[in-house]
Image (cartoon, helix red, strand yellow):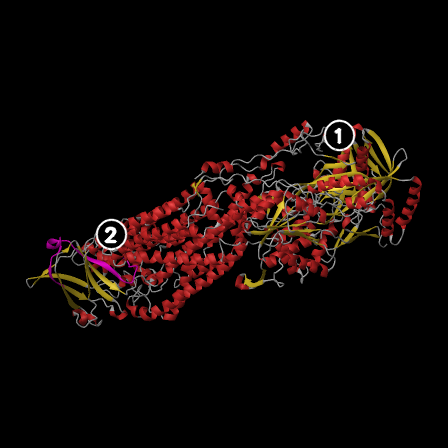
Amino acid sequence: MGSLLSRLGLECGRKAVKEEERHLRANDRELNLSYKYSDNAIKTSKYNIFTFLPLNLFEQFQRLANAYFLFLLCLQSIPEVSSLPWYTTVVPLVLVLSMTMAKDGSDDMNRHRCDKQVNNRQVEVLVEGELQSEKWMDVQVGDIVKLENNQFVTADLLLLSSSEPLNLVYIETAELDGETNLKVKQALTVTGKLEDSVEKLANFNGEVRCEPPNNRLDKFTGTLTLKGETYSLDNERILLRGCTLRNTQWCFGLVIFGGPDTKLMQNCGRTTFKRTSIDRLMNVLVLSIFGFLMIMCLILAIGNGIWEYQEGSKFAAFLPKGVNAPFSAFLTFWSYVIILNTVVPISLYVSVEIIRLGNSFYINWDRKMYYPKNDTPAEARTTTLNEELGQIKYIFSDKTGTLTQNVMTFNKCSINGKAYGELLDFSGQRVEINEKTEKVDFSWNNLADPKFCFHDNSLVEVVREGNPEVQAFFRLLSLCHTVMPEEKKEGELYYQAQSPDEGALVTAARNFGFVFRSRTPESITVVEMGELVTYELLAVLDFNNVRKRMSVIVRSPEGKLTLYCKGADTIIFERLNPSCSNLTEVTTLHLNEFAGEGLRTLALAYKDIDPEYMEDWKLRHHVANTAMDEREEKLDALYEEIEKGLLLLGSTAVEDKLQDGVPQTIEQLSKADIKIWVLTGDKQETAENIGYSCNMLREEMNEVFIVSANTSEEVRKELQTARRKMTPDGTEEPTVKKSRSGLFCLQKTETVADEPVNGEYAMVINGHSLAFALEKDMEIELLRTACMCQTVICCRVTPLQKAQVVELVKKYKQAVTLAIGDGANDVSMIKAAHIGVGISGQEGMQAVLSSDYSFAQFRYLQRLLLVHGRWSYLRMCKFLRYFFYKNFTFTFVHFWYGFFCGFSAQTVFDEWFITLFNLVYTALPVLSLSLFDQDVNDWWSFQYPQLYTPGQLNQYFSKRAFVYTVLHSGYSSLVLFFIPWAAMYDTVRDDGKEIVDYQSFALLAQTCLLIAVSIQLGLDTHYWTAMNQFFLWGSLSVYFAVIFTMYSNGMFLTLTSSFPFIGTARNSLNQPNVWLTMLLTSVLCVLPVVAYRFLRILLWPTINDKVRYKVRQDKVLPPTPRRVQARRTSTRRSGYAFSHAQGYGDLVTSGKFLRRTPKSRPALFSQTDSPLAQTQPQFYRTISEREEPPLSP
Amino acid sequence: MSQQDQKDHQGQQQPEPLPVHTTTIQKVRIMMKEELETTNRPDNTAFTQQRLPAWQPMLSAGIVIPGFVLIGLAFIGIGVALFITSQNITVLEKDYTGVETTSDCYKCSNPSDKNCTCKLEFSLSTLFEGPVFFYYGLSNYFQSQRSYGASKDEYQLSGDLDYFKTPISACSPYQYDANQNPIVPCGSLANSMFNDTFKLYQIVNGTKKLVPFDGKGIAWWTDYNIKYRNPSVTPLKNAFNGTVKPSFWSKPAYELDTSDPSNNGFVNQDFLVWMRRAALPDFRKLYRRITEGDYARGLPAGNYSLEIAYNYPVLSFGGRKKVVFSNVSWMGGKNQFLGIAYLVVGSLCVVMSMVMLIVYAKFKFPEDD
């Protein structure tokens, strides 16, 4: 994605002259072409055949490592400096470059193919008075195109006319902003008159002046001039490329922006490139390694200077040149830069990429993260962040769609003091309801929704018996709501509800025989137990946040006036008729029970109204409704007046269904010491409710702080009070550790230390308070308090605030954060966090598209982190530690040899060995280590989530670990150089010939090195698969095969100067003392490590050691008992269950939606059979029918 | 390892429960749909699911402590064998640089003095068991210097006549002489060939008895037969037409051994030995073997006199020259280090195993979580 975007940036940047204003005329290609606007062809590919090689190489050499190797290559071409032949650098460099090139090339091929496919899509274009099918790429600005249902919008179009009344079109913008709900666009009436008459359209010659191409999706300004009159154009008239036409038979549009100018393409800005903390650490390390390298080279160069001065000058008779010492030292410095370059090997970066890619594939392949219900496997969308998954400290989660399914089900109810919905067995014990429990049969009701489940048969029995209270209960549910019905075919009803709760309630009523069938602004038609009844709708007293209730006043066919009201129990109970007190008590008990189970409750009440009073009230209502000032207050007072003396009917309990395994996942993650913060746009009550039901908030917690103040000072006070309560003897001032990090220590970081807390606390903060708390002077206060709590829930937060919270934690905690969400409102947070996870297969694709990892269910998060993340981190750290060890050891041997070769940059090893060491001899074993290694398998990883904590503390690879590695390799290199030196010094072969000649010594030293690092690898490997064995032994055998081949007569005779080591292997490896030396070096390298590790396991065992020991002991633990969720009987109760701010009341009564005959329009929402379409809040705008007045003549 | 149990835990995942629908037709339809739509389901292989069978060793006391003991004992055994073998090797080493004024070679240490010979006398009290190898040794001599080692022409040395005319530039400044004649063999490595010669006499009853030296086969077989070859021109001298000998040499390459025509040019044994450059600044090189006549069993006890033609100057750079008489064993020449190192490491292993045993006994692995 990133590359695609950057390429687009490239395209955009090329435009030399900035467009000031766009001017075009319909059906006038000549004029439009004269402006040289881009046509509709898009190009996302980067290269063509000719530019591929130079461009790609240019890009690749922009990478530091590649550039460094190029620099080395240049150095090597200077004969005075060149201490190694050219192939030692060229072979790896070419290998790396060609691998990257192949990858880039194939990526670009795909893009070419995609571009071609898109550019060749067909669309009908009006050309010279006729509709012709043309390719997308041939469409020009100013053309008129015809779109049909379910077609993609070709370019950014000005909507001219459509098949639908009022010139409406419906579009889906999922590709653009991720929202799956349909949006409505309306053409100008003046253009709407063109309809689908080709003749009229061909003669249409309107001129458009508008803004130049830009990336604002929600804004458009321009004018249309037609027949001397000017009309203003706004976003409502524009169809953007990337949208899909829905539920509209056809429409015509005028192309305004094409190809790269479209808002979709303009919007593909550069996304920030995420890097892992290991990446950043590695940069710092590489830089310090460079420094270290320079120091080593400097020491050796100075050594060379001294040597030249003391020895070399006197040695002049034998040495080629009597050079002056400082110049020789200077040359030597560069020679050593070449030789010691293996400390920063190019193959490190390649290997790191391969390892990450491999571990990403494991995520894609994991069947335990595959969700069969919608056939979605997990997907690693970025392949560069894997190891960071093993270091997560904070998780920021969305609620709706992430923790919950966003599906509401009518679960229980209490009618007239009797609770329904529980299943009891013969002994009166509750029966656990699960998938297999028998469901109530609704076949008697042919309008019932087949997807509705209910288990308590008694309720059906009472409703069919005709119990008046129960019938009134369901009648209320079928009347008091703002749901829109949709009846595509006779008897197939679909409800469009603004909140899923409402949909659930109306559906429940439908199944119990009170089917809401249709509505007009003045009436509601309900099928009551098979009988069609039409109620006259007199008033809708709509819901809002303050009222927390909604009522309708209806007149039944018999002429009886009734007010039906549903709302938050506390609100309703205040307005009850005193006669209901007994019933209220019983209902309260039930409500508590429901709330204790985490259900969302509503109380229902009704009241009969006197017709005369109603007349009077209606009159006053009308007056208030048309009042110019204080309309709201006046209406509220009127509502208040009539919603009094209600009679309680009962209560409903709707379950906001959690996704499977959410509480268990949260428990596991918190055992792994990961803190989970819920950031939701939902109401506080809802959020709290979910907090309880997924075990984040618990009754046994010491306290749950609620921060919901309205001023800055109050928020601060509440935060401070909470903090002081948690740590009464804590310091007032936060302990802030200031440090510097990053390359050259340029970044200043401040870390707020964790503070110890006694007991468990939780905090709930609402969006309003959060806005104050996130201000500069209070953010640390917020962070301190929040971080002391076990659970933090932020409700009513905006997408921006979500990102701010993430940024806050990132800034002051220096911890790795993960954000998980499913909707477009989570995108900001997903992008802000170190790792963004998208829940796929739900609301749109936006979250997934901007995420780094995606899967279908929240519960897969624990597998992603505790298994894949942990392993990736472990593997990456092992890899890095081992890789640095191996290369440092390799390099340090050269350093020691400097003292024995006059600091002349003579290599210890054969040049071919230097070339192949990283690429062939040690590449695959370490790769197999870092692709297959696991300390314990996934089952045990889940058993002990604590295994995750070392990653959070950076224990496996840090600066400290790096220093240990350097010291370790220092020791190894000493052994590897000085043992062969001492063992061979002044000795000879068993036939009296020399053995300390340079070539034999080189062979001995390199073989010792290879064996020692191979054994070290073996020590580091915890999980020996066949692959590990194969690669390790294979590499060693390859080494011996290669040296015997390279040192053979044939190779020497073919390429004399490249293979001067002829015969060395044969002559040296038959000597017993050579093998004895190898054995000694290997043992000396390895045994101290074994002893150290063994003692460390005994004396300071880590959690890993303990668990591995347990695994070894084969003590299979009994499955940990699932925490049985205690039935809470709390006074905590959910409020009004609507998750929206304001109801549809206005729309319903104004009837703006209902003017169309059902026949002319197919389903408003094509996907009505999915729960989504019903649960998605829809946003409509008022559609005007008036003709737009011309702006000016 | 409890592979069996492991497998059980990792066993195949239960399929997700399917949603249950009330209408059978719908159920069937949906199930069919799901069967069709599981195309994205990842493969269930041990590799993709990371369940490859594996051996998972651990550093447990049962392996580590006995392992240390065994390695320790084995090393002590090897160390003893190496040490005794090394002890049985006789080495006689004599410096003849002529630094001390008492030395006979002191007179030759002045580099301006050409064709100087000096004597080195020594006596053996017992038989120096044969076969005896005679080495010359140089100290503080950096054959390992990079540009020194690189200063030779492999192609020239393998007999390629083209490179006789134009030696490679690595040979510089011993590529061409002052008159732009190519030097063959070129380069400082060849130029600096060791040119002291030795004759060993046994003093028997006051008369000097020459100890025969065997100079054949002192170089590596591969060097003699493959790596270095003379150009196939007879007589060999003609190949060198138009070239000059290295400035340091007294004789051209084709006249190195006047006694044996096959021991000339680039396959001269002394030349080959010299060209195999040493890795360390102190080295010895095989000069001759003593394997013939009365000395086949070794050098008998008695007085010996070594006559040295002192040509090679080393004092200018603080170098030392020496001669070494040595015999060898199955493990090569005398080297105490390896035996001692094995003994030390072996004992350390045993000691370490004791320490670990004590620690283990004290801090048994914690049983609790």
Tell whether B262 sits left or right of B165.
Answer: left
State the image coordinates of residue A1020 (x, y, percent, origin top left): 43, 49
Residue A731 seen in the figure: yes
Q: Nearer the viewer, mark 2 or mark 1?
A: 1
Kind of residue indicated by mark 1: Val
Quarter of the view holding residue A19: bottom right
State the image coordinates of residue A1181 (x, y, percent, origin top left): 79, 47
Residues in magenta, as a range: B276-305
**Marks 2 and 1, Cα distance to the nearest angstrom?**
96 Å
Which sits in the foreground, A561 or B19?
A561
Residue receiving disc 1: A460
Marks 2, 1 in one chain: no
> Dot 1 surroundings within 10 Å: few (below 14), some, or many (20 or more)?
many
Q: Is residue A1055 above or below residue A942?
A: below
State the image coordinates of residue A286 (x, y, percent, origin top left): 48, 59
- For residue B80, the mark is 2
Q: Is residue A367 above or below residue A69?
A: above
